[in-house]
Image (cartoon, grey):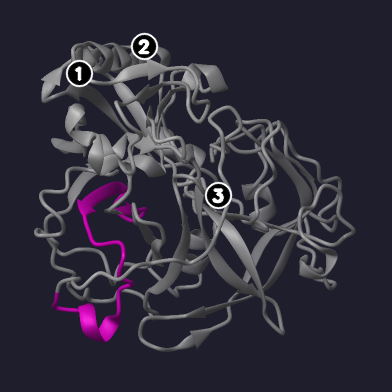
Amino acid sequence: MITVLCWVSVCAALQGCFADIPHFGKKSASRSGSSFVLPVSGNVYPLGYYSVSVSIGRPPKTFDLDIDTGSDLTWVQCDAPCTGCTKPRDSLYKPNNNLVQCKNPLCAAIHTSGNQPCKTPNDQCDYEVEYADQGSSLGVLVSDYISLKSMNGSLLNPRLAFGCGYDQHFPGPIPPPATAGVLGLGNGKASILSQLSSLNLIRNILGHCLSARGGGFLFFGDDVVPSSKIAWVPLSASSSVKHYAAGPAGLLYNNKPIGVNGLQVVFDSGSSYTYFNPKAYQAVLNQVRADLKGKPLKETDEDKSLPICWKGVKPFKSVNEVKHQFKPLALSFTKGNAQLQLLPEAYLIVTKLGNACLGILNGGQVKLGELNVIGDISMQDKMVVYDNEKKQIGWVSANCDKLPNADRDYNGDFSEPYAADFGILRQLSPATCFL
């Protein structure tokens, strides 16, 4: 999710199943720790987002959190007491004399220069975060133990800072999320990634592998980063505002330029769908509509799942049944000389009504302005790596159905995928989707 106010918080071409899976080689560790891998739940449609389970406190209590590379603050619903919380009271986080004070450097990290609520260094560190869909969380920064098991088998319980959200607001007609909060993975100092790295537990690198069939995995550290075949592009200067941006990039449709260049692109796992600025969105829509002329697909306004949907002669059961009617898109990055391929399955969904809908949305309609966002739909079946040490982002086709294992996968490939089914989450509409 891209945050506003307090924070301005891929699927590339699969060349035939998983026939060209990259080599996942073991890295020489520059830190004292290893990598942490967490199984991911959820999907793009119909559930609407991906989440992980995190154990917090002593004794540990488990919370399901949205994974969000578009913001850096982690927060959980908190019994302080709570207004607008969606979980039963016994499922909320309970603070216990563990408030973070304003003098803590992490407090300054979560406040912009124009938003300094602290009056004295010993005050509690309050926060307020508002997302692009006008949803919000108000609370106080706390610190507590978070249980993590590294790939080398060691159990760690670092004490990390996160938000205790005691006032949540979820606008619109869509039900509030089934999760208990947000796992902020942006590149700001307050993110869980940055805190783990500052403790020398991991390298300042994270990544995710989101399966188009549901589930996947999230990792901290570099032990499972592919040693070959990954496409890298440098992070742009705008990434200093706590999210991961790259560019400039030009748009291609069916391998041909369509006159849209200079795009700055944010990779945001907190957004279900991909958003282009109004000019880029209209150019893509025009190309798709022109290409569908004479084909057995009819645009329909009966399906409200997404703004643009098509009906076939008979209902579709999956994207595989309709993807051959569409052409591939690509983002061609000038720096790094890399392309992010978007096959039809990286920008289409098939709804419960059996229609095919465009999973690329107009960012202007959700007040994103000229910002372009690569959401989960376009990062499925890809390992996407955010390298804050080398200030680059990379992607490569991968089998996201199988969790990496240190003994099995070092010096070997991922194979024998299994069906990942980690839970049931909610659907987000384009009008209210957290970005």
| Circle 1: element type | loop
Q: Horizontally, is 343 left or right of 429 in the view?
A: left
* Residue 163 or residue 364, whichever sits in front: 364
Distance of mark 2 from mark 1, alpha carbons?
A: 26 Å
| Circle 2: element type | helix
Is 413 one of the magenta-colored residues? no
User: Where is residue 121, by image quadrant?
Assistant: bottom right
Amino acid bearing label 2: Lys
Amino acid bearing label 1: Lys
* Residue 331 or residue 361, whichever sits in front: 361
- Residue on which the image places disc 1: 295
- Residue on which the image places disc 3: 72
Q: Position of residue 43 (x, y in %)?
A: 44, 52
Distance of mark 3 from mark 2, alpha carbons?
A: 29 Å
| 355 up-or-down from 25: above or below | above
Q: Position of residue 266 (x, y in %)?
A: 40, 35
- Identified at 63% across, 31% down, the residue is 133
User: Where is residue 153, by image quadrant?
Assistant: bottom left
| 47 up-or-down from 432: above or below | below
Is 399 one of the magenta-colored residues? yes
| 333 up-or-down from 94: above or below | above
- Identified at 19% across, 28% down, the residue is 325
Q: From which residue to which does the magenta span run?
A: 384-412
| 181 up-or-down from 115: above or below | below
Q: Position of residue 248 (x, y in %)?
A: 27, 26
